[in-house]
Image (cartoon, rainbow, N blue to C red):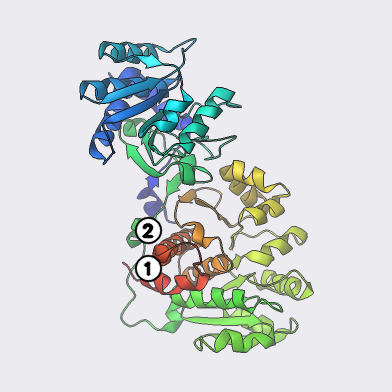
Amino acid sequence: MSEKYLSALLSVYSAEQVKQAEITAVKDSDISLFNLVERAASAVFEQLQSIDVPTQSVLILAGHGNNGADAYTTAAMLIRAGWSVCLQASAAKRPSEELERAIAEFEEAGGYSTAFNIEKITQANVIVDGLLGTGVKGELSDEIVSIIKAVNNSAAWVLSLDVPSGIEPNTGWARQVAIEANMTLTFGAIKQGLLTSQARHCCGELILADIGLSPYLAQSNVKKLVCDDLPKVFKPRRRDSHKGDSGKVTVIGGDFGMSGAVRLASESSLRSGAGLVTVISRPEHQVVVCSTRPELMFWGCELVDMEVYLKLGWADVLVIGPGLGIADWGYNLLKAVDLAEKPSVIDADALNLLVQFTLTSKNWVLTPHPGEAARLLGVSIAEIEQDRFNAVRQLHAKYGGVIVLKGAGTLIYNGNECIVAPVGNPGLASGGCGDVLSGIIGALMAQGYDNMQAASLAVVIHGDAADLAAKDGERGMLASDLMPFIHQLVNQI
């Protein structure tokens, strides 16, 4: 992906980078840490004033760190505005100067805190979560676990301050439990973990509150990409273009009983704008592949011979894996793709074959879901999900190229830059959706986008198509339901 395009995307940061920005802001300007607390609290106050909540009565849960200071200062502002505020907290053993000042202002406004009360939490209408923020370290106490569970079991509308309590801000993982918020107001910069893993569920609506840290944030190599960014990179086609200008893709897969996978991948390539698409599959699958999509070309393959190599040589981009199987037939085709030395997308069973047949390449895109990623790295799925950023780095170090780690908040990494794409919905958790994505990536590569750009754009197109397809409901959504929306999205320029 070009440097110019990357610079136009929204940067996201680690919690440590944001903390350093706070330190730098205090050092290099007349801003104090408590000024930052006040700015954060003002943003929370304005958000609560602007939303349609059932009553101007709020329960605020305050912790011991600066997240707690944000909570106390917000409470003081709400009291002065006439809200009914109940603030629950436990005594801090070593409160920071900011927390002490926030508590004093809260008490000056007429507020008083009470101990945590599970019954009142479960009965609340509006809850502000200021328990932990970015300060998650080690195991949560039994008290905090019980509070978080009570919030999640309540019918309250929940606003989390900075980070839903229990979520690790750099990974999006919850070691035990986490607040499931309706909205998260994050301060200063978006923390990278909020866009992936369990945070995708727990954050609810994620809103960035500008508290003046932007000039002090260091450069980040992690960027956020969503559908609104697509017009920045897609360009109209020339009026005198022809099908050869749009790229040639060969899709390889579909062992016995798995014709649907290669059919989906090849159609999504066409729908994404590839000029010509050939399928290499079992001869028995020609009718299934071509009868309802006659625009596809087909080559029946019983064994890898010179004709197969000619078909591979014809293509600009190879997509291998959908329905490939892990028997000798698929293994030999993967070896042929390796020998062809063409830009390639490696998906599904081709990834499973890589576990036995280790290869590296600078010119391919690997698209593992967490289970495939775990097999590729020889670890558990839980280890992948606990730190997806680390997992995608390890995959690149071992296999090279561009890695697309699919899931809630897909990561795309090329060894230098990481794109986080918080797109799509649970309707994609059904057979064939990954095959559709591999076809989109291959088509964009064939149209001249570099591997990183093609992979990143394809993930966003795929996710947004899923959101459009899910307007009638996520359950029962089919991979083939995405096709008309893919066509629509690649033309929204």
Q: Is residue 288 above or below residue 238?
A: below
Q: Answer left or right for 36 relative to 172.
A: left
- Closer to the camera, 274 or 226? 226
Residue at which label 2 appears:
227
Q: Position of residue 197 (x, y in %)?
A: 53, 45
For the question of whether residue 423 can be seen, the reply is yes
Badge 1 marks a residue whose secondary structure is helix
Are the residues at dot 2 and dot 1 in contact (C-beta closer than 8 Å)?
yes
Quadrant assignment, res 5: bottom left
Q: Residues within 10 Å of mark 2 (few under 14, many from 20)?
A: some
Question: Disc 2 and disc 1: Cα gap in Å?
Answer: 9 Å
| Element assignment for label 2 | helix
Residue at the (44%, 12%) spot, across then down = 95
x and y, in percent, of residue 176 in the image = 59, 34
- For image coordinates 41% across by 61% down, the residue present is 467
Which residue is labeled 1 in the image? 489
The quadrant holding residue 356 is: bottom right
Q: Amino acid at mark 2?
A: Cys
